[in-house]
Amino acid sequence: MAEAETPTIALRAPDTVMKLARLGAFHQTRLSFMRQLLRRMKAEQWRFEERVFDIDTNGVGHAVYVAHTPRHSYSLVAFSHDLPADQRSDRVIATAWDATFTLFDGIPDEADIARLAKNVPRQEGGRVSERELSLSRANRSVRLWDYVVDRLAAGKQPDARKIAEVGYLMRTTAVYGSGKFGAADRDALADRPEFRAPFQVEMLSVYLTRAFVMDLVEHMARVRAPGQALALDPVLRRRFGIGNSTGLGMAPFLITHPALLNNWVASREEALRRVRALPEAPRATVSAFRQTAARARIHAHGWRSEHPGQQAKLEDLRADMLALTEHLDTADMTAPYPWDRLWRWGEATLSLEGQEQLVSLLLEPHGDLVDDLCETMSADEEDNWRIDGAMPLADLRVIIEDVYGWALAIDWSAKPAQARIWYTSEEKLEPRMGERFEEPLAPYEQPLCPGRDAALMHAALAASDAPTVAEFLLKHPEHRHIARRAQIAAQLPYAEIRDNTIDASMMPIDMLRMKLSFFGACHFDPRSDRWVRINMYQNAPFPEDLARNAADDWTLPRLPEVGE
């Protein structure tokens, strides 16, 4: 290709990327937080030990699993309970669980265990200290737990097909960190390399929880049949992840942390841009990509959901992965800029599901090129929080029209445009969403619709003769929050969801899926438009496997061997 024909590879526009429908089609990538953590564990040769496993014949007791990093040790302290079936609930208002956990900074002594035993099982009802880094709880899978215990106790392995139907033995219903209920603030840990990336405390807690759950189910089988029970076959064992039920509480996080949101998406978009900008594709890389695409097609066919919206997305994804496979059979990957050509084909051909899966696939064989972007994904929100009061008011108006042009085109007097309302529940202090015209919630509304608020401020700007932002806000302090957001979005292009977050047709699960994709979650299974189940660490190596197995080749199912 002549120099004059060299394509200009730009980042995708925020107006393209930051729409809810596209965010709700994001997939995990090699930048996702679980994968970052396991790569670090492998590279730094973390050591793991089961320090305590004191569980009785009823499945009641506690265990301590320790991860030793080069500089620190962290202990998952797990409490196992004998929970009656009628008390098992995934709802946040639950007060009892099959298991409760905390991630402890260091190795707990007997006094620590005694203190934690009084508080961790109570979750919100208890209190933890700055020595604790997270607080979490989990419930057994009703469909799978007893079945696996029964099979192992009978001296048989569980059926792989039944494992595939659920994929986990326990699912967490909350994993709290960053100072909640007295746990350590993130600022206290931010200088530790292992926790510099977002949500590494929570990802480590879930990873160790998975190890405990697998040991617990084997323990319960041995209790039932001491001389006959089997341990899980290692291949089957790895097929279990940790489930998670996530609801509305997670959605506002993306709105209240604009700098962090920007850095997550900007890292992903820069990774895509780098791959597309490669002028050629080595044969080995193309081969690796083809294999990854084939594995993604298997993954799409193994993904199940009963939610009609997700079922439609899965039909699109399966068709897209077939189209990609067929395209790769004829695509000339020796032509200049082959990855950009492939991306442009995908943009023109695939659904949103397929396009965002293609982003993940394009990054996969290019770790050397993109993995350094993991270092850019954290953020200090205070760095951009100060309002620039000296900014000329005309400049703020230009920003509003640029960033929120989509919102200025909405008729905010129409009921469907403002049908929803975000508020905080009195009982659990958790974010909730109600119907504005059906419930008396207006006095409790949270500022979680930047688009509407930007349109209101834009109207006030037009009627103001103030020369600066500071003088305008002195007269109109109700617009301070959106003036701040606009100035942040002017510097950080992916800081704002460019869609109406209170529209009657808005799907909160789009925000949930976007965030969970950055965690590294797979198999999104919405249970309504407001909560979703996922699987974490399915097929990942266990702590004892990391030394002799790859840390980062587990998110997609392997290709069948010859003869299988």
Image: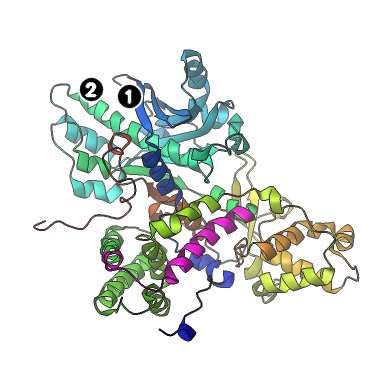
Residue 516 versus residue 192 in the image, above or below: below
Q: Which residue lies furthest to the front in this view?
A: 3
Residue assigned mark 2: 223
Q: Is residue 110 found left or right of 338 in the rendered image?
A: right
**Going 39% across and 43% down the picture, which residue do you hit?**
38
Q: How crowded is mark 1: few (under 14 residues within 10 Å), some or many (20 or more)?
A: many
- Does residue 445 appear in this view? no
Is residue 282 within the magenta segment? Answer: yes
Which numbered dot is residue 59? Answer: 1
Q: Quadrant of residue 420?
A: bottom right
**Going 36% across and 73% down the picture, which residue do you hit?**
280
Q: Residues within 10 Å of mark 2 (few under 14, many from 20)?
A: some
**Going 34% across and 60% down the picture, which residue do you hit?**
365
Q: CB of mark 2 within 8 Å of CB of mark 1?
A: yes
Q: Closer to the N terminus: mark 2 or mark 1?
A: 1
Q: Is residue 34 found left or right of 432 in the rendered image?
A: left
- Does residue 14 appear in this view? yes
User: Residue 154, how many percent across, how many down?
Assistant: 14, 31
Going by the numbered disc 1, the residue's amino acid type is: Gly
Q: Where's the N terminus, which quadrant?
A: bottom left
**Going 36% across and 29% down the picture, which residue do you hit?**
48
Is residue 530 within the magenta segment? Answer: no
Magenta residue span: 259-287
Q: Does dot 1 land on a helix, a strand or a loop?
A: loop
Q: Nearer the viewer, residue 392 or 502?
A: 392
Q: Nearer the viewer, residue 35 or 226?
A: 35
Q: Which of 380 and 135 is in front in this view?
A: 380
Residue 442 versus residue 112 in the image, above or below: below
